[in-house]
Image: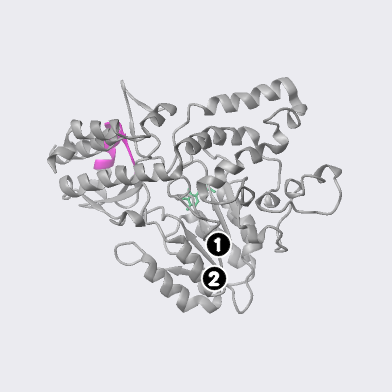
Amino acid sequence: MSDFLSDDYAGAADAADPLQHFRAQFHMPRFGDVEQAYFVGNSLGLQPRGARAQVEDVLDKWAMEAVEGHFRGNSQWMTYHALVGAQLAEVVGAQPEEVVAMNSLTANLHFLMVGFYRPTPERPAILMEAGAFPSDRYALESQVRFHGFDPATDLIEVQPSSDGLFGMDAIAAAIEEHGHRLALVLWPGVQYRTGEAFDLAEIVRLGHAAGAVVGFDLAHAAGNLPLQLHDSDTDFAVWCHYKYLNSGPGAVAGAFVHARHAMTDRPRFAGWWGHDAATRFRMGPDFQPTPGADGWQLSNPPILGLAPLRASLDLFTDAGMPALRAKSEALTGYLETLIRSELDTVLDVVTPRDAGRRGAQLSLRVRGGREQGRSLFEYLSDNGVLGDWREPDVIRISPAPLYNTHADVLRFVRTVARWRDA
Ligand SMILES: *Cc1c(COP(=O)(O)O)cnc(C)c1O
C-alpha cells in the first residue's frame, strides 16, 4: 500500500494519463508560489483558458457591429445558443434538438414542470429524495402548492437509510408504494451531499411503468458521468453549467426535452425565443413553438453568459466523456484507496464504494464531529487544499478529471495526515 503514497507512484500515474495536457487549458488558482489543490469543481469549475477569448469575441462584435451582430458571421447572436447544441448533446447523451442552454437551473426546473408536472386529484404527487438540495425542494413544494395540492401528502420524500444513501431498492419500493398517485418522479443524477449516483435508466423504467413522468436534476451529474438521456427515455432534465461544466459563476443552464415530446401540446409558459425561428420576426400574435428543446426558450439569451460554455464544451468534445470517466474512476479510486488505508481514523467515506454508484466526488465525514471537522477543513484551506464543507461534519472532495492529478490527491492525503499528527 505504501508505494501508492509515494511521489513516484503519483508522478508515474500522471505521466501515463492520456488527458494530462488538459490541465494546462485551465487557470489553476494560486496558493502563494504554487497552485492550489482544487477539489471544488463540483461547486464552481475552473476557468478554461479559452473562455476569455470567447467573451472578448462577443464584446468585440458588440463594439464593432452593434445590432448587426445579431445577423453577421458564424457566431451571430440570433442563433448563438445553437452553437453549443451538438456538443452539449454529446455530453448528456441526447440528440442536438433535445437540449438547449437557457435561463438558470432552478428556473428551468420550474419552466419544464409547467409542462411535465400535470397533477390531477387522482395523481397529484411528486416523488423526490429527502435531503435534496434546498432549491429543488423549494421549487417542487411551491409547484405542488401552486396547483392547489398539499405538500404534506403530495410531496413524497424518499428517506435514505441510516448511512445517508438510497440505493435502487429503496427507490423501487417507493415507486411501487406510491406509484398510483405519482404525477412526477424528480430525482438527482448524483446526490449533492453524499455523491451517490443512480441508475437513471432504471428510474425512468420504474417511473414510466407506474404511469409517472420522470425528470432529473443533473446539476452534479452533467459533465461528471456519461449520461444516456435519449436512450433511457427520460422525459426531461435540467442542469447547471458552472459545476463540472466549467462555464463560470451563474452560467446559463441546460435543459433536455425528449424527442418524443418535441411537438408536445403540453402547456408551457411561452416567450418569443421559443417561437418557430423561421417566422419569429414576423412578430405575429400567435405562438408557434419551435419543435424540441428550443421551443421552451423564453428570451433572447445572455450571449456574454453563454460565451464561456463554448470554450468549455470544446474541451469536453476533445476529451470525450468515456475517457473522462475512465480517468475520473481512476482518480477518485486512488483517493478512496488512500483514505481507507491511511486516514481511516480520521475520515469515514460516506459515498458508495462501488464506482458504478458514484461520480467524481467523495463525501468524507470527519470522525469526532463538527469541531474536528471544522479544524481539519480550515487546516486544509490554510495549506492550499480546497474542498467544501457541508454541515455538520462533511468535507466534499471532487477530483475533476479535466484538471486534477494524482499528485493533487496525494497532497490532500498528506495534508490530512499532517493535521492528524500535529
Ligand atoms: C447547484 C445546485 C442548484 C443550484 O441552483 P441554481 O438555480 O443554479 O442557483 C440546484 N439544485 C441542485 C441539485 C444543485 O446541485
Specify the quadrant that holds the C terminus: top left
Please tell me which of labels 2 and 1 falls first in the chain: 2
Assess disc 2: are there few (<14), some (14-19) or many (≥20) residues with their C-alpha within 10 Å of its C-alpha. Answer: some
Query: Which residue is depicted at the point 77% across and 28% down?
Result: 67
**In the image shown, does 283 or 259 lie closer to the viewer?**
259
Q: Which mark is residue 24?
A: none
Give the percent coordinates (x, y) of residue 38. Answer: 35, 35
Q: Which mark is residue 208?
A: 2
Give the percent coordinates (x, y) of residue 213. Answer: 57, 67
Q: Secondary structure at mark 2?
A: helix
Query: Which residue is depicted at the point 43% across and 43% down?
Result: 43
Q: Which mark is residue 233?
A: 1
Give the percent coordinates (x, y) of residue 211. Answer: 57, 74
Q: Amino acid at mark 2?
A: His
Above-or-below relation of 122 to 290: below
Above-or-below relation of 91 to 47: below
Query: Which residue is depicted at the point 73% across and 53% down?
Result: 270
Q: Is residue 122 left or right of residue 332?
A: right
Specify the quadrant that holds the N terminus: top left
Magenta stretch, residue numbers: 376-388
Query: Which residue is depicted at the point 70% across and 25% down?
Result: 62
On the question of residue 46 being in view, the answer is: yes
